[in-house]
Amino acid sequence: MSKSVSRRSFCKTAVAAAAVLSTAVSSPFIIGAEKNKKFRVMLVGSGWWGMNILNTAIASQTVEPVALVDVDRRQLDTAFNKTKESTGLELKTFTDYREALEKIKPEIVINGTPDHWHALVTIAACKAGAHVYVEKPICHTINEGIAMVKTARETKRMVQVGTHRRVSPHNVAAMEFLKSGKLGKIAHVRAFVNYQGGPGQKTPDSPVPEGLDWNMWCGPAPMMPYNTRIHPKGFRWFLNYANGQLGDWGIHWLDQLLWWSQEEQYPKSVASTGGRFIREDNTDAPDTQHVVYQFDKFDVTWEHRVYAGNPPEQHHLGLYFYGTKGMLHLGWMDGWTFYPSATDKGKPAESMGPQLNQPDGQNIDALWSDFIESINTGKLPVCDIEKGHRSTTMALLGMLSLKLGRGIVWDGEKQTIPNDPEACKLLSREYRGEWKYPT
């Protein structure tokens, strides 16, 4: 991408942001007119992570929880009992988010559904007048993300994406270090997640548990036989519903990359290799994958494996930034560390440990506070839907290349793969049954 293209992209983004700000004053949902106003919040997807977000929102004392939505009555009943115990409130419960939006009319929707539901729930919530906190990755296919950004802008709703590392103290400090020039000129970035694992074994399909609407759980995606490996929690390893390790972990580190790169927000080309070489279970996501993203001024590699975690490698996930003055590792539980170049003899390493909140070592509280501030002030949130879309697109392009079996050229300005109809078909997919793909 040339400098001129980057500037055009920046200007278009700035104009879009200005348009949102200029209309914010006239929107009753954008500006919180009442001091210390509590927003009526509804959770869609009441599993463990959705409840983490809701509990953080409740603890912030910025919301009034009013409803829970889940297609699995077991999760819904558990969430109902936990919120009643913690708040004394008996929240309304629904199994269909459309009915809930119509009857409850929430001001905020937390979208904690599986990946294949993120687009439809977010778009419907925005059109119903609610601001949305949506988990990452924002979508299952790239054109869904385009529709989500379009809807958020047209409805003037604030949409925060759960890429909470943008507010984690050690991540913020690492970005300041990188942008200070102390690493010199950076020409290569390596993003990676390598966990210990093994072949596993097949889990047989089983009858749908009582209380679970499996047809609704599958929704717009292909309907597979029920399997405990898919739900609860395991859906990320089934490509009908998610995009494997790259879609799950990859978006976090690729989002950090785009945060650092600033001007260069799109790769020019993407090529991926990998497959299933170790796993013998009934998941279908790759256990090994490499992706090369080519930018104008640097290149990026992604790698993951779910076996041979190799503790001697010191860091098993994160980003390595390679510059002329040394190398910086940005991680999760291990913070960040700068390793000076061998030519700088005697120069000490620098580091900062993590500052994480529980449960699960995250910083949802700061991200939620930023979200509420964006609603009250009209300023786009730190993890705005457009940023989340760009980061998600990076991950999905890697999966698209792997499925295609070859590299692609990416036009980030037009958000398409030029002169390549075969590849463009994978930017979206057919929806099942009554569900209509968003435009």
Image (cartoon, rainbow, N blue to C red):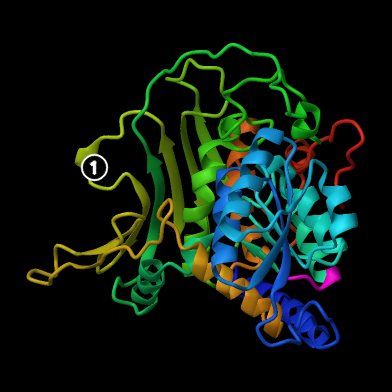
Q: Is residue 297 visible?
A: no
Bounds of the magenta segment? 154-158
Q: Please name the residue shown 80% across and 35% down the image.
A: 219
Density class for disc 1 (Cα within 10 Å; few <14, some 14-19, many ≥20) is few
Q: Quadrant of residue 109?
A: bottom right
- On the image, the x and y values in percent for residue 146 come to 76, 57
- On the image, the x and y values in percent for residue 24 come to 79, 84
129 or 432: nearer the viewer: 129
Q: Please name the residue shown 57% across and 68% down the image.
A: 368
- On the image, the x and y values in percent for residue 393 come to 64, 52
- On the image, the x and y values in percent for residue 272 come to 53, 38
Q: Which residue is mark 1?
A: 313
326 or 63: nearer the viewer: 63
Q: Quadrant of residue 63?
A: bottom right
Q: Residue furthest left?
A: 346
Q: Is residue 4 above or below residue 52?
A: below
Q: Please name the residue shown 78% across and 68% down the image.
A: 107
Position of the N terminus by quadrant: bottom right
Q: Please name the residue shown 76% across and 77% down the image.
A: 16
Asked if residue 83 lies left or right of residue 317, the reply is: right
Residue type (three-letter) at the residue carrying disc 1 = Glu
Asked if residue 161 lies left or right of residue 415, the reply is: left
Q: Is residue 200 visible?
A: yes
Asked if residue 348 lies left or right of residue 202, the reply is: left
Asked if residue 435 lies left or right of residue 64, the reply is: right
Give yes or no for residue 89 being in the magenta stretch.
no
